[in-house]
């Protein structure tokens, strides 16, 4: 991995918080993600299972974590199984973790090679009453592919049908949204790298530059600063492309007079940043562009004030919607009389503001969390309002990452330029 070693206290504390929530006499088993084929002799770039990483810090394929705090054999209270390397793997794939390295990363002392898993498991599993297994329960995910967790569930239930089985995801959904100090520092690092990439491209942009050239400048800065790469496919959407919410083609020329909507973020040590900015190709907003830009900025600042402990997801988004309505009326995009007659289930502002204002951020860009649980101190959420006007070929979105601290919050991107005049000044310096 490119990033520097993370303090193993993070993973030791995470395991303690997780095991404290297990039923008595329970075992939990976590699998690494699959290696997905790309072609006849290649696999996709490996991305670790976020829950396994959260509990172990191991960023390597073919890994299994077993937690059994009440195990009668003290050797197996927490066990990590990793892939054993050999000369062939070393030549073709490079270095794999040694047992001592895995101990240093995870803080787990019982490390075995992966092929020992099915030798050790039968010696202890019958002393467990309940087995917690993991699946992807993110609200945004719909199961289509029988991934590693699913295949393991089928196998273990077939071998041990009389055990009680529970969902580890219910515990992870409560734990992961509340970030520890170490996690906050890792996300701050991702934000800092993202800031530097944004400043880099502000000085690079000019009419005639291609969207993909801007993307290249961003990834250059990311890799230069030891990020793994993009947290998600970057959006470099100039002109009318800004009205495509997940525009990823990034293949058009940036034209004089247009605005570019950026949405990108660095991934550092598996933790993510998520930034949106909108900037003029020629370095100067025209009056209409600046009016829309400042409207979005006012929405963002009003929304940020509501990101506090105890706030309710749906109520928060509904309040932001009212602010958006007022700004759209001022921009003459909506009429207040039409708003008064609108169907509350289909508010008119949705024509120009299509997506939600915030999502949790962490090991996943859209981090695993409950949409029904009030916000808590330690949550990190995006704040990303936008106004999209296809008929004008204009889309503006602004986004920062906000850490909730009790009845207030901290903007982790407060040092990234956002005022229209500041952006213009940098672009023309």
Image: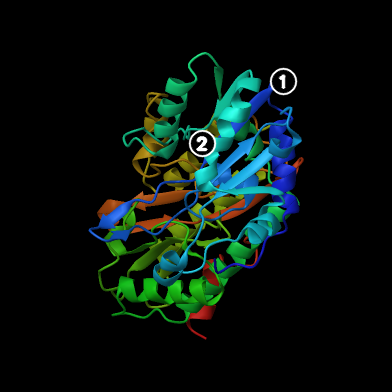
Residue 320: quadrant of the picture: top right
- Which residue is drawn at the image coordinates 63% and 40% (left, top)? 177
Please, which residue is most extreme toward the bottom here? Answer: 429
- Quick one: label 2 or label 1, which is nearer the N terminus? 1
Graded by Cα atoms within 10 Å as few (under 14), some (14 to 19) or many (20 or more), the crowding at tag 2 reads few
- Which residue is drawn at the image coordinates 37% and 31% (left, top)? 338
Element type at marker 2?
A: helix
Asked if residue 226 is positioned above or below residue 350 in the image, the reply reads below
Q: Which residue is mark 2?
A: 118
Residue in the foreground of this view, choosing between 365 and 73: 73
Residue 417: quadrant of the picture: bottom right
**The N terminus: image quadrant:** bottom right
Residue in the foreground of this view, choosing between 336 and 83: 83
Q: Kindly identify which numbered label has been placed on residue 24.
A: 1
Q: Position of residue 140 (x, y in %)?
A: 42, 36
Residue in the foreground of this view, choosing between 123 and 368: 123
Q: Is residue 386 visible?
A: yes
Whether residue 99 sits left or right of residue 61 in the image: it is right
Asked if residue 311 is positioned above or below residue 329 in the image, the reply reads above
Please, which residue is most extreme toward the left here? Answer: 40
Please, which residue is most extreme toward the top here? Answer: 162
Residue 39: quadrant of the picture: bottom left
Element type at marker 1?
A: loop
Q: Position of residue 153 (x, y in %)?
A: 45, 28
């Amino acid at each position: 991995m490119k990033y520097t070693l993370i303090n193993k206290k993070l993973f030791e504390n995470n395991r303690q918080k997780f095991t404290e929530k297990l039923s008595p006499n329970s075992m939990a088993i976590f699998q690494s993600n699959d290696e997905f084929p790309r072609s006849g002799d290649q696999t996709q770039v490996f991305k670790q299972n976020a829950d396994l990483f959260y509990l172990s810090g191991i960023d390597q394929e073919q890994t299994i974590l077993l937690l059994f705090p009440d195990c009668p054999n003290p050797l197996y209270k927490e066990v990590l199984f990793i892939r054993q390397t050999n000369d062939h793997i070393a030549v073709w794939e490079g270095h794999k973790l040694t047992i001592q390295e895995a101990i240093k990363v995870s803080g787990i002392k019982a490390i075995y090679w992966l092929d020992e898993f099915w030798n050790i498991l039968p010696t202890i599993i019958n002393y467990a009453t309940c087995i917690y297994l993991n699946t992807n329960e993110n609200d945004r995910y719909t199961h289509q592919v029988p991934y590693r967790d699913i295949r393991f569930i089928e196998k273990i239930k077939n071998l041990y049908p009389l055990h009680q089985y529970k969902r580890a995801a219910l515990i992870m959904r409560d734990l992961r949204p509340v970030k520890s100090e170490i996690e906050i520092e890792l996300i701050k690092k991702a934000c800092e790298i993202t800031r530097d990439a944004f400043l880099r491209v502000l000085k690079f942009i000019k009419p005639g530059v291609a969207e993909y050239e801007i993307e290249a400048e961003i990834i250059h800065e990311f890799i230069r600063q030891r990020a793994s790469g993009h947290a998600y496919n970057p959006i470099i959407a100039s002109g009318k492309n800004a009205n495509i919410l997940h525009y990823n083609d990034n293949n058009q020329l940036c034209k004089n007079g247009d605005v570019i909507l950026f949405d990108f973020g660095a991934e550092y040590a598996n933790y993510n940043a998520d930034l949106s900015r909108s900037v003029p190709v020629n370095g100067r907003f025209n009056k209409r562009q600046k009016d829309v830009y400042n409207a979005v900025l006012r929405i963002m600042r009003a929304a940020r004030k509501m990101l506090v402990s105890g706030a309710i997801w749906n109520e928060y988004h509904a309040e932001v919607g009212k602010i958006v309505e007022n700004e759209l009326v001022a921009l003459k995009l909506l009429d207040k009389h039409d708003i008064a007659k609108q169907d509350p289930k289909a508010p008119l502002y949705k024509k120009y503001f299509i997506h939600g204002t915030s999502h949790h951020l962490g090991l996943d860009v859209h981090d695993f969390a409950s949409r029904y649980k009030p916000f808590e101190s330690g949550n990190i959420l995006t704040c990303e309002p936008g106004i999209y006007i296809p008929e004008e070929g204009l889309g503006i979105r602004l986004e920062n990452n906000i850490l909730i601290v009790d009845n207030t919050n901290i903007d982790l991107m407060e040092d990234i330029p956002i005022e229209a005049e500041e952006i213009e000044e940098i672009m023309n310096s």
